[in-house]
Amino acid sequence: MPSYPFLLVDAFTQTALGGNPCAVVLDADDLTDQQMQRLAQEFNQSETAFVRSSRVAAFGVRYFTPSEEIPLAGHPTIATITALLHTGG
């Protein structure tokens, strides 16, 4: 599997290793559903966000727990925006 840029972001805090941790995988367009699920299991965070391109917005995001995809979640959304701001994405 190719490598993908990712960040581990602590949402709702300014303290490292505090708050709600979330893995954010950038440039995830070519990952399959199964690969995203496997990566979410590997990261073993409560949620993992996968940033993808979108035809209707600046970007899209899919959210996975270690066991399933979920439609939306608060702290992964905050973590994704933080990651994008941090990386200039």
Image (spheres, helix red, strand yellow):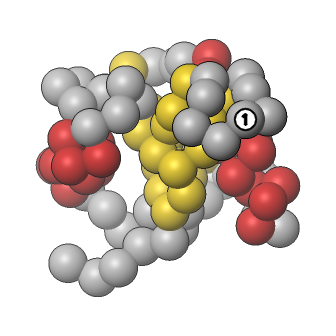
- Farthest bottom residue? 2
Q: Disc 1 designates what residue?
A: 15
**The N terminus - image quarter:** bottom left
- Give how far across and how far down residue 33 sits, in percent: 24, 47
Residue 33 in the figure: left or right of residue 24: left
- Give how far across and how far down residue 13 sits, in percent: 74, 27
**How many neighbours does mark 1 have within 10 angstroms: few (below 14), some (14-19), or many (20 or more)?**
few
Residue 29 in the figure: left or right of residue 7: left
Q: Nearer the viewer, residue 12 or 83?
A: 12
**Image vertical order of residue 5 relative to residue 59, above or below:** below
Inspect this view and state whether residue 76 appears: no
Q: Nearer the viewer, residue 42 or 84?
A: 42
**The C terminus - image quarter:** bottom right
Type of amino acid at the residue the image marks with label 1: Thr
Tell me the residue at 29%/82% (across/down). 2
**Image vertical order of residue 69 relative to residue 6, above or below:** above
Residue 44 in the figure: left or right of residue 3: left
Tell me the residue at 61%/29% (across/down). 18
State the count of labels.
1
- Give how far across and how far down residue 16 sits, in percent: 65, 42
Tag 1's secondary structure? loop
Tell me the residue at 62%/24% (across/down). 19
- Give how far across and how far down residue 65 sits, in percent: 31, 27
Inspect this view and state whether residue 41 appears: yes
Determine the image quadrant of residue 60: top right
Q: Nearer the viewer, residue 13 or 68?
A: 13
